[in-house]
Amino acid sequence: NALKELKGKDVNVHINSPGGDVFESIAICNLFKQYDGDITIIDDALAGSGASIIATAGKKVIMYTNSMQMIHNAWTYAAGNADELRKVANDLDKIDTAV
């Protein structure tokens, strides 16, 4: 990945995102946490939803007075019978606990 090429040099990561997939966000966060150098997260305007998870990976986080983070419980659209919907609810609870 591109981080390996930086060989531990300090990195600034600018975020301006409404978010995205929770598992992709966790994977990016964990990748940043494994990096040998210092990562500074700069919230340029919005670190929303999944992007707020990524923002936690920085050794330092910079936010401007007009920047925002939007953090919320996991949610999804679902269809199915009662057993299937209970499983979906349990999965959402697990995600909330994990992040």
Image (tube, rainbow, N blue to C red):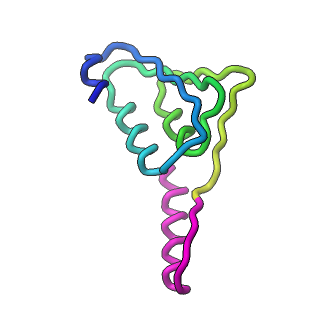
* Relative vertical location of residue 84 with respect to residue 42 in this rendering, above or below: below
| Residue 22 as seen in the image, left or right of residue 2 | right
Residue 75: which quarter of the image?
Answer: bottom right
Q: Residue furthest right?
A: 66
* Relative vertical location of residue 54 with respect to residue 67 in this rendering, above or below: below
Identity of the residue drawn at 33% across and 27% down: 35
The percent position of residue 43, horizontal first and vertical second, equals: 60, 26
Q: How many marks?
A: 0
Q: Is residue 81 magenta?
A: yes
* Relative vertical location of residue 40 with respect to residue 1 in this rendering, above or below: above
Identity of the residue drawn at 48% across and 23% down: 13
Which secondary structure class fits the magenta region best?
Answer: helix
**Between 32 and 49, the one nearer to me in the picture:** 49
Residue 17: which quarter of the image?
Answer: top right
Residue 9: which quarter of the image?
Answer: top left
The percent position of residue 86, horizontal first and vertical second, equals: 54, 78
The percent position of residue 30, horizontal first and vertical second, equals: 38, 39
- Image quarter in which the N terminus is found: top left
| Residue 47 as seen in the image, left or right of residue 67 | left
Identity of the residue drawn at 50% across and 58% down: 95
Identity of the residue drawn at 62% across and 55% down: 73
Which stretch did the figure color magenta?
A: 75-99
The percent position of residue 99, horizontal first and vertical second, equals: 51, 49
* Relative vertical location of residue 12 with respect to residue 19 in this rendering, above or below: above
